[in-house]
């Protein structure tokens, strides 16, 4: 269940007792799901815990399964003891074409046969937008290109990012016109 609303906060429900110190309030745990695109940006959210609104900052680069602690935001303590803490575990499902491994992103980019043979340019998606890459003639399927600093933000390291590793996959035509087939046959005979 998504814990944050788009315009404001939602109440956390079903807290579990995470641990208890003498007279201190209970520690609560909750899970929060955010998309990968949101996890790539530092942003603020408003949540409601026990009818109390909290404004929290989610740092860019948060990882799937990572837990943060909000001190004093758990259950109230007794006899003047401090309140417990709130632990939020983040779930970051991949909702993009990228594969995330640590701070690096991986992407498979399809190349048509003609661009692979003759060379040219290819527009490639990154988390920051699109970039134009030069394709050398005769590029092989499986060739990798590393784009420095175009990966995922590094957690609590403002302005630093991992790399984007692009793997080219050459698409072989599955249907040819008679003219195209004839030209390929001529090319084949030239290399015999």
Image (cartoon, helix red, strand yellow):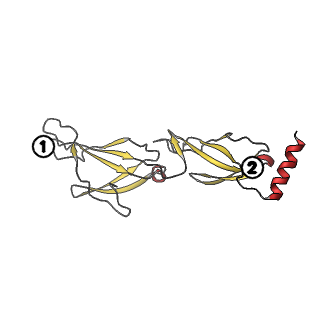
Q: Position of residue 47 (x, y in %)?
A: 31, 56
Name the N-terminal-most of marks 1 and 2: 1
Up/down of 149 relative to 129, above or below: above
Q: Position of residue 104 (x, y in %)?
A: 55, 40
Q: Position of residue 32 (x, y in %)?
A: 35, 50
Instruction: Point out the frontmost of discs 1 and 2.
Output: 2
Q: Secondary structure at mark 1?
A: loop
What is the quadrant of the N terminus in the image? bottom left
Residue at position x 45%, y 49% in the image: 39
Q: Secondary structure at mark 2?
A: helix
Neighbour class for label 2 at 10 Å: few (<14), some, many (≥20)?
some
- The residue where tag 2 is placed is 113
Nearest the viewer among 169 and 181 is 181
What is the quadrant of the C terminus in the image? top right
> Which picture quadrant has residue 163?
top right
Nearest the viewer among 102 and 8 is 102
In the displayed structure image, the side of residue 16 where residue 98 appears, left or right = right
In the displayed structure image, the side of residue 129 where residue 14 appears, left or right = left
Residue at position x 37%, y 56% in the image: 45
Question: Residues at badges 1 and 2 in contact (C-beta under 8 Å)?
Answer: no
Neighbour class for label 1 at 10 Å: few (<14), some, many (≥20)?
few
- In the rendered image, the residue lying farthest to the top is 22
- The residue where tag 1 is placed is 80
- Specify the label residue 37 is tagged with: none
Nearest the viewer among 155 and 12 is 12
């Amino acid at each position: 269940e998504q814990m944050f609303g788009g315009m404001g906060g939602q109440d956390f429900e079903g807290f579990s007792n995470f641990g208890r110190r003498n007279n201190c309030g209970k520690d609560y745990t909750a899970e929060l799901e955010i998309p990968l695109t949101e996890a790539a940006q530092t942003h603020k959210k408003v949540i409601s815990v026990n009818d109390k609104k909290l404004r929290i900052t989610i740092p860019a680069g948060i990882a799937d399964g990572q837990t943060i602690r909000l001190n004093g935001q758990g259950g109230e303590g007794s006899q003047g003891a401090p309140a417990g803490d709130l632990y939020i575990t983040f779930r970051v499902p991949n909702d993009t074409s990228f594969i995330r491994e640590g701070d690096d992103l991986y992407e498979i980019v399809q190349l048509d046969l003609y661009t692979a043979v003759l060379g040219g340019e290819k527009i490639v998606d990154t988390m920051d937008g699109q970039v134009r890459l030069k394709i050398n003639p005769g590029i092989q399927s499986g060739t990798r290109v590393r784009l420095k600093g175009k990966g995922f933000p590094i957690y609590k390291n403002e302005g630093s990012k991992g790399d984007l590793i692009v793997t080219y996959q050459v698409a072989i035509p599955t249907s040819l016109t008679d003219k195209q087939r004839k030209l390929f046959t001529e090319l084949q005979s030239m290399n015999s």
